[in-house]
Amino acid sequence: MKQTRLMMGMPITVEIVNCKVKLFHFQEIFNYFQYIDDTFSTYKENSEISKINRGLLTKSQYSRDMQTILDLAERTRQDTQGYFDIHRGDKIDPSGIVKGWAIYQAALSLKQKGFTDYYVDAGGDIQVSGLNSHHQPWIVGIRNPFNREEIVKVVSLKGKGIATSGTYIRGAHIYNPQDKTDNLAEVISFTVIGPNVYEADRFATAAFAMGKKGIEFIEKLSGFEGYMIDKKSIATMTSKFSEYVVKSVEESEKKDLKSIQ
Amino acid sequence: MDTKKIALSSIVIVSFLGYSFYVKAEGINQMPALAPVGNNNRQAMMNSIPTNTPTVTLFPSATPSPTSAGSSIVSTPTAVLPTSIPTPTPKPNSQYKDGTYTGSVADAFYGNIQVQATISGGKISNIQFLQAPNDRGTSIYINSQADPMLAQEAIQAQSANVNIVSGATDSSQAFMQSLQAALDQAKS
């Protein structure tokens, strides 16, 4: 069974392959995302994060989830040479790490309920588990950032997380302050496959912020693969990314022809 | 002789000043780089949003200095949009009244989206983003060349036979919501 809700301005989809699954299982996941939005949205006046930013809460008053997220954000800052940073002046905005973490928590809650075959997708960042309804690994397409109707890469995933960081608001108006001719909007879309969606998401975010050298950063991380699309529609991939790729029929046919010859 | 000298040098001074104002104005106009490069309409609209400021008004860096004598050359930068923006109706000629309408604020998790639509001649002539988030709100730093050892390919369309799709968080829903609210006002 598959359910989708539009929440937090994006579609959240959960599919569970199990004949015993009921609607309330999905509702629990959507309620969880609602709680996440109510707690971590910097655009909600009464969210915990907004209260923290207004100086209304002391550290000892932070909720457990808030403390967890802030610790994870700090760890990620260290893991990414400072590219990932939730500090904005005297305010903090952890939304760059919250989504991946929340998807992973939602997926873990399904596992705790005994489900083995499912996925949780929030705005294109996905945790998969087990197999799809055809008893195959989940098949995930990477969207063409220039044409949202199109898929430009197909990967097959078992128990992994995949996240794409990108900008639908591209443009030539961001410059490297040291060199005005260096256009930072080179990278349009950056997809990372990792051990889970939390890990994939935080490193996709950081790698995207690094510009073209982001792919080298992912290459050096063990257990992670990346697929980066630049503004010229050229994709650069890490060395083992191809192990996940599902070849299109045409490509497979070419390979077959070669092997016959 | 003296008057001739004065006249000549003042011509030189005036043209130099004029040129420097022109250059300055050109520089200011180039900064926001508003010309959309996308081939798809919505993509092109999105191109004109700055990515570095999550909720601030558009193009803060492009505000020309009001004291500049050359400021008359500087037009207020607005999001330049293709004229073929899809309107919700196939016959846009009589439905919308001319004017500028501000849409509702729509929540898109990483920030709010709010647009202002300008109708002229019964058609949408301009859409400005009053508020726009960027994906994950992370600052963008310096880039460098990608490792030439890593495999590259030109992206190409694949079979759409997939279970799930991964892509950057799409706020088009929030965009359409805000635009619709603006257009509803234009109808009345």
Image: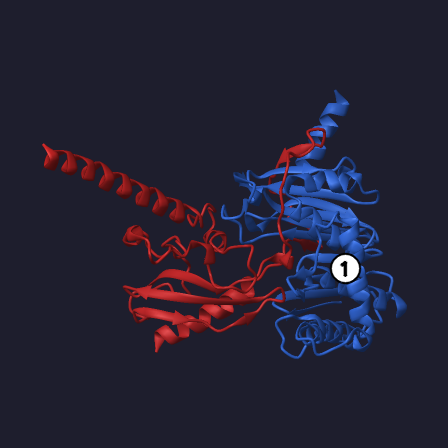
Chain colours: A blue, B red
Image location (x, y in percent) of residue B179? 45, 68
Q: Position of residue A65 (x, y in %)?
A: 80, 71
Q: In the rendering, at what x and y percent does residue A250 appear?
A: 66, 35
In which quadrant of the rendered image does the C terminus of chain A lie? top right
Q: Secondary structure at mark 1?
A: helix
Observer-nearest of B138 and B68: B68
x and y, in percent, of residue A106 in the image = 79, 67
Chain assignment, label 1? A
Of the pair A69 and A36, the residue shown nearer to us: A69
Q: Quadrant of residue B182?
A: bottom left
Furthest toward the top, the residue is A261
x 28%, y 43%: residue = B17
Q: Quadrant of residue B106?
A: bottom right
Q: Which residue is mark 1?
A: A73
- At x 74%, y 41%, the residue is A217
In the picture provided, is B176 more to the left or to the right than B156? left
Quarter occupied by the N terminus of chain A:
bottom right
Q: Front-most of A154 and A259?
A: A154
**Residue that protrudes farthest toward the front in the picture:** B2
Depicted B67 relative to depicted A225: above or below: below
The residue at the point 61 percent across, 72 percent down is A43
Give the quarter of the image for residue B65: bottom left
Q: Say which amino acid is labelled 1.
A: Ala
Image-based side of A93 in relation to A28, left or right? left
Q: Nearer the viewer, residue B81 or A184?
A: A184
The answer to whether B93 is drawn above or below residue A261 in the figure is below
Residue B78 against residue A218 in the figure, above or below: below
Question: Is residue B185 rendered to the left or right of residue A153?
Answer: left
Is residue B100 something one can see in this rendering?
yes
Q: Residues within 10 Å of mark 1 (few under 14, many from 20)?
A: many
In this image, A88 relative to B180: left or right? right
